[in-house]
Image (cartoon, rainbow, N blue to C red):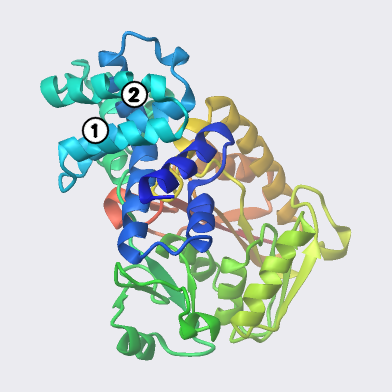
Amino acid sequence: MNERHIAFSVLMKTESEGAYSNIEINKAFSSSDIDARGRAFITNIVYGVLQNKIRLDYIIGRFSKIPMRKITDDVKTVLRMGLYQLIFMDKVPEYAVVNESIKLVRKCKKASSSGFVNAILRGYIRDGVKYPKEPFSYLCTYYSYPEWLGRLFFEAVETDAEKLMASCNMTPPFTVRVNSLVISREKFMQQTGAKPCSICDDGVIMDGGFSVTDDYRFTAGFYYPQDEASMMPAKVLNPKEGETVIDVCAAPGGKTTHMAQLMNNKGKIFAFDIYPHKLKLIEDNASRLLVSIISPVVQDASEINEKYIGIADKVLVDAPCSGLGILRRKPEIKYARSPEDLASLAALQQKILETSAKYVRPGGELVYSTCTINPGENEKVIEKFLENNKDFELIDLNFKNSPYIKLFPHIHNTDGFFIAKIRRVG
């Protein structure tokens, strides 16, 4: 398969099977010998199409006499790919985009649609397109957000909503957490030319062309690929040597192993996950990173385990969430979520937090974090918990005049993240 066909196959799996783009791209690369340039081209198209799907479909609808619901997924995907290249990839000649799109639709055994594809793409080249005039509709169309999600962005950041929408469509930097159990951050930066992260002093930004494939440092446990925002919950929890820590939603172990690193691999960490196969991921990561204090436990975070009541100095609740802070990495989330999903997730988060708080000893601390910017999964969960649990108090993290840490792509160039810290008193 050529590069466009690989990109097409990945997009079809996300469209028809609900697959995650990052996982499917990795599968495609591992089973092919595509060079670095080809991989960059494929990645650009896949993420670009997913990030801009509503905008691309709007353009198709402006030129098509066939209703969108009657255009098959494969033809629609070919059109989205073609339009994305025309709009965003100026190094690809227009005639090449049209010709390759026609070839691709024929490979899909849809030769009868080649004229349709040709007409849509040439229509756009000839006439361009006018977007909705109403400001809110324009933003949601131009940046490709369902209107309910656009409203949520305005609720989260008010006047910065357009900046947030645009930033969530950009490519994130490749950051890693340096494993101080093996090497210092300074020495790692000297070896690799990496630049320090601005918020977390365990993180570095790697060069855009860096790959962990066949990198001896990765195998030797020098680092863990992780967004800078994702490093912050462990830093805020601040576990110490010799303490007992529980991570209630631990897989695949990024934050768990980070806590072990901060504890100098001395103490005890119980790592909960509901799925045994995910505990294997924690064990594998711990082994690679030379961490030996983690004990994996098969445990549903929403159900109490009386064995652990009141034993923990520190508890981390990195709760399952809508993922609206990681759209740069998984843009398909924009179209997979619904307002109903957010409500059910908030209820689950509330239950997990109530359960996890029982593991905290008097004087102990708990960090609650999510990778979403939705206030209903963040501040409101904490506020409701504190109303119902008078033996806990909020610890003011004093971040940008807020008691919470709230990170945003358009401000901090990190994933969107929320972090709160509470203490059991009395």
Q: Work out how far the residue at label 1 is from the one at label 2, CA to CA, in angstroms.
A: 10 Å
Viewer can see residue 231: yes
Name the foreground residue: 12 vs 388: 12
Q: Which residue is drawn at 26% across and 21% down?
A: 120
Q: Report which quarter residue 104 is drawn in.
A: top left
Q: What residue type is labelled 1?
A: Val
Q: Which residue position holds label 1?
A: 98
Check disc 2: other Cα within 10 Å, few if <14, some if 14-19, many if 20+. Answer: some
- At 41% from the left edge and 44% from the top edge, which residue is drawn? 5
Of 327 and 10, nearer the camera is: 10
Q: What numbered label is drawn on residue 114?
A: 2
Marking on residue 337: none
- Amino acid beneath label 2: Ser
> Is residue 420 placed above or below 107 in the rendered structure?
below
The spot of residue 314 in percent (x, y) is: 65, 68
Using the image, determine if residue 243 lies above or below residue 411. Answer: below
Pointer 1 or 2: first along the chain: 1
In screen coordinates, is 264 left or right of 405? right
Give the farthest residue toward the left.
126
Q: Where is residue 72 in the image (x, y as percent from the top left)?
A: 47, 21
Q: Mark 2 falls on what kind of element?
A: helix
